Image: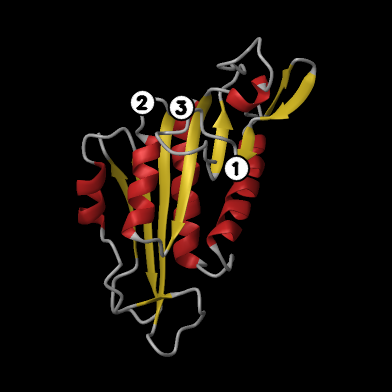
Amino acid sequence: MNISDKLEGLAEVFSNEFLLNPYLAYTEHGLHALFFNFLLTKLGQEKITLFSEWKEQRVCLIQKEYPTAANFERSRRQNWDISILECPLKSLKENEPNSFDFFSLEAVFEFGLNASFKHLESDIERLAHKDANLKNAYIMHFYRLSEAGARFSSRDCSTNSKSILFPDQIEQQIKGKKVTVFYALVDLTQKHTSIFKKISGQ
């Protein structure tokens, strides 16, 4: 099994854990932290290489907020939620200053918790960009719903929200793009069926 298969398998496990325990993290950034630790632990248990060296410095291959390789027609470079650096390490600017900032990426995971359509659209656009310098593009698109007016958490989305996207809508957004979405929706009210689905653009 190659690294991309392992990462996809772990992303599926993490998504299903969210269905069972959607309140382990308060915010999307909390999910980033949980997933970072989850990858570090699980890949380590499977004896996957997690550390390498670059110019005599030890580097972890799992990175939080690693910069994008290009500006993507914006004013500046952005940052990915979770990145897996390609091993052996390769930099687009190997013999230049800041070579540490331009590694080629094995995979990127972008997260959304009750995220808007615009948030998802931006993630898809950046992940599918010709200058992204990554092999595997993933989105973890999660919803946590509770009753309008009596929500379990202020961070929850109302079951009546018009902003909720369903799998068929996401399929249309990523169709023809080399992006995979791990979709999970939890509804405490059971108005919507709680569901996990892996959605591939290709």
Tags 3 and 1 in contact by the CB under 8 Å rule? no
Q: Residue reaching furthest right?
A: 56
Compared with 123, 46 (above or below) is: above
Per the model, the C-alpha gap separating discs 3 and 1 is: 15 Å
Is 86 left, or right, of 134 in this rendering? right
What percent of the width, then of the height, locates residue 9? 45, 41
Residue shown at 35%/42% (left/top)? 124
Residue sitting at x 50%, y 59%:
17
**Mark in the foreground, 3 or 2:** 2
Q: How is the image coloured?
A: secondary structure
Name which of mark 3 and mark 1 comes first in the sequence. Answer: 1
Circle 3 or circle 1, nearest the eye: 1
- Going 44% across and 64% down the picture, which residue do you hit? 19
Report the residue marked by disc 2.
130
Name the residue tied to disc 3.
Answer: 134
Q: Secondary structure at mark 3?
A: strand
- Residue neighbourhood size for the residue with mark 1, other residues' Cα within 10 Å, grouped as few (<14), some (14–19), many (≥20): few
Q: Earlier in the sequence, mark 1 or mark 2?
A: 1
Name the residue at 40% across, 90% down. Answer: 149
Spatial separation of the CA atoms under disc 3 and disc 2: 9 Å
Mark 2, Cα crowd under 10 Å, few <14 / some 14-19 / many 20+, is few
Q: Which residue is mark 1?
A: 65
Mark pair 1, 2: CA separation: 20 Å
Quadrant containing the C terminus in the rendered view:
top left
Question: Which amino acid type corresponds to the residue marked 1 in the rendered image?
Answer: Glu
Q: Vertically, is 100 above or below 64?
A: above
